[in-house]
Each structure stands twice: as structure tokens, then as C-alpha cells.
Amino acid sequence: MTNEELQKRREQAVPRGVSNAGPIFAAFAKGATVTDVEGREFIDFAGGIGVNNVGHCHPKVVAAVQEQAGKLLHSCYHVVQYEGYVALAEKLNRLTPGDHAKKTVLVNSGAEAVENAVKIARSATGRQAIVASGSGFHGRTLLASTLTAKIMPYKAGFGPYAPEVYRVPYAYCYRCPVGRSYPGCNLECAELLKKRFVDLVNPESVAAVILEPVAGEGGFVVPPKEYFPRIKEICEEFGILLIIDEVQTGFCRTGTLFAIEQWDLIPDLLTSAKSLGGGTVISACTGRAEIMDAPQVGGLGGTYGGNPVSCAAALAVIDVIEADDLAATSRALGAKIRTAFEDLAKKYDCIGDIRGLGSMLAMELVHDKAAKTPAPDLAKGLVAECRKNGLIILACGNAGNVIRTLMPLTISEAELAKGLSILEAAFAKVVKG
């Protein structure tokens, strides 16, 4: 079948609400290259939206999946337990920030991990309210989409939303929510949380604040180094738990195993997914043991949560990460990408900001640098032009004007060079210097 033939079948069989980055159908993938059904190769700068940090079909992950598939595909952990679930929980308890006693529940998606984190926080505190940010993305289920900030396409027409969710602006220095400039801003964006306890929600009703350490779909926004410590201080002052959502940032994407380590902060609860499974379906919520034990027996879980094949894949992913020091790889990769982006910024005034951590980098595109007018049309054009020439890359941001990189950390020098060359050529074609 050709891409065009499959696209016609897709249009008849799949709802329009299921978005696609382009009319490409993959036949197979390896490392950082995807081959479509017509035999055309694409350099992958999207990584399944941050899922393939260890690369497509890593041989150790594939071997672990194959071995486990021949032993046990499913028993439901609630009915008959298996070692893989316990072993993965032990690993995550060891690897997540902090040396305190921790426990982990395994579920299926990032949204499900977030929903369970909220359930646990509410059970542990006896409170109902949750505070999220104006740049956050936490999933597409009812509660997760309530926590998510962006209306189109994630929320429009799907209300009413879950109650007792409140929002504060994020620390977005390029577009400061209080019109100040860092570092002379006295971190007023963090202080907005405390101010909202006066005119928005009673802090004694707040169970948790949930934040991404780097706002992913919100535009790869990186808060200042003082931001999260101050947020944690405010939370502790009012007995509020801090949930850090590492669904996209986790597993070396930002140059450390978990991004929040770069703020030297220990969250109460941490959610992970995406690259944890190396392409298989799994997610986790890890937290302080006493908090995790708050819900009643039967209050957490799900039929497919912590599937044995996915657990085997995740354990193999962690082995690869540790053996190959992918955190260092991410930092080195990020340095190369940042240099390439800075070179582009010297040629094209539409690049208003370059930001990110490790290899989780982005360029924000604008039509006017002084006014910072978002340029989603340029981002869309670049994505399309790159795809035409063999590069898969994605846009993000609340205005859709940010180009981001989520390529596998195992990408080869040749694949990286080819991808960056295609991106540079796309700028020459789409953008006027």
C-alpha cells in the first residue's frame, strides 16, 4: 500500500479528531530513522513525542519484549502478581529524586499517572483543590485535560471539566506573566501562587500543585533556577503537596535522569511515562511511601497497569540508560543542537528565543522581535517543508509557534547532521532572512 492509499483508508475508518503530523505511514524504524511504506527514510526529530529516548527498536528492549512475550503477556497484577512489576517499582523508587522511602504504582499513560497522582494527593491530604499552570499539558482524560492549559485542540467542546482545579501563570521569562525581566523580577511569577491563595482558592483546600519542570507542549519553557525551590517553600508553608510531571522530561531528555534534579528539588510525587517504556505502554507515579499508602486497598490500579511485557521493556530501557550514560549523551547532543540553532538565529530574525535543557531544545518563532508576535504560520511551514525533505519535526507552544527537538538520544552523528541540514534548508525556503 502507498501512503496515499492508506491515508484514504484512514479518513474512512479513523475520526478526524485523531490528529496526524502528516500523511506518512511507517513500515519500520531503527535508531533515529523511520522508513515509510513506500521505502522512504525520515530522520526522526520527534521520537514518538519524546517516547524513543533509547531509539526505535533498541535491540536490548526488543529482546526483553520478545522473551517476556513468550512467558506471560497478561495476568492482571491485581489477580496474579509477577516480579517485573515489583522490580520496576524498586528501580523507580531508587532512581527518582530523594533518598527517603518511596513507593510506585504502575499504570498505562501519562494522563493516567497524573490522575492517580491527584487521587493520591487528595487521599493523603483530605483536600480537594489542585493548582496547575498556564503552560501545562497533563493529558487528555477528563481530569488531565482540565489540568491542561491550552484550549484548542485539547479542551474545546469537551466540557464541563472537573471541579476544584485552579490555574496560575507559569515562569515564562520570554513572555513574563507580570511584565518583568529576570533576574531583576524578584521571582514575582512564583509569588503569584501565594497571591492566588487570597483571591482564588483557600490554601487549606489545596491538596497539590502540579507542574512540569519544563513545560512541554506549552513551548519547552524553562523556569529560572530559583522558581521551583520557591514554589516548594510556599507549598510546605500551607501543607500542600508538590507533584512534578516528568512524563515528557524524564529519562535523560534534559541531560539528567529527571529534569527536576537540575533545581535540586525533591517532589512529593513524580509522574513518568513516554520514554520509560521504550515504545511500550506504561507509566508510573512514584512518591513518598506514607503519601502513596494513603489510598484504600483497591483505590489504585487498573486491568492493564504494569503489564508484564511493558515492565520488561522498561527495565531494559533503564539498563540501557545507565550502561550507556544517556544523560551525558543528552547534554552533548544538546550542545550541538543549541549551536546549530544559534547559527540559524544569526541568519533569521524570526527566531525570538532559544531555550531548553539537554537535548530538549526549542526555537520560538515570531514575526516581530520587539513585539514578540507569535508566528505559528512559519512553524507550520517549516514542519511541512522538513517532512517533504525527509525530516520529522514537531511544533508546540500555546500559540503553535515553537519548533522543538525530541530525537532519540542514540541518534548517530550522520543522522543528526542530515536532520539539521534539512532544517536549515527549510528555513531558507520558508523564511525570509
Image (spheres, rainbow, N blue to C red):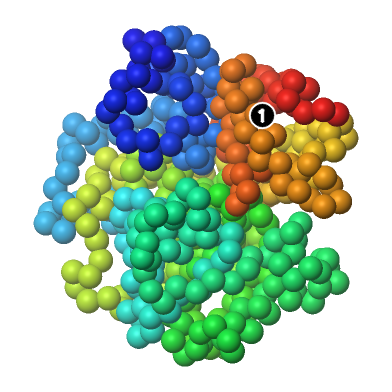
Residue 384 position within the rendered picture, expressed as x and y whole percent measured from the top left: 60, 25
* Rendered position, 138 above or below 377: below
Residue 417 position within the rendered picture, expressed as x and y whole percent measured from the top left: 70, 22
Point out the image quarter for the C terminus: top right
Say which of 47 and 128 sits in front.
Answer: 128
Looking at the image, can residue 339 be seen?
no
**Callout 1: helix, strand or loop?**
helix
Which residue is at 22% across, 50% downward?
Answer: 304
Mark 1 lies on residue? 382
Q: Does residue 21 appear left or right of residue 234 in this picture?
A: left
Looking at the image, can residue 351 be seen?
yes
Q: Amino acid at mark 1?
A: Leu
Q: Does residue 172 appear left or right of residue 400 in this picture?
A: right
Q: Residue furthest front?
A: 157
Which residue is at 85% across, 72% downward?
Answer: 184
Q: Does residue 238 appear left or right of residue 13 in this picture?
A: right
* Rendered position, 296 above or below 41: below
Residue 307 position within the rendered picture, expressed as x and y whole percent measured from the top left: 25, 47
Say which of 314 and 357 sits in front.
Answer: 357
Q: Specify few, some or many for label 1: CA neighbours under 10 Å numbering under 14, 14-19, or 20 or more.
A: many
Say which of 88 and 119 sits in front.
Answer: 119
Say which of 156 and 33 sits in front.
Answer: 156
Which residue is at 32% across, 36% downward?
Answer: 15
Which residue is at 84% across, 33% downward?
Answer: 348
Point out the image quarter for the N terminus: top left
* Rendered position, 46 above or below 7: below
Tag count = 1
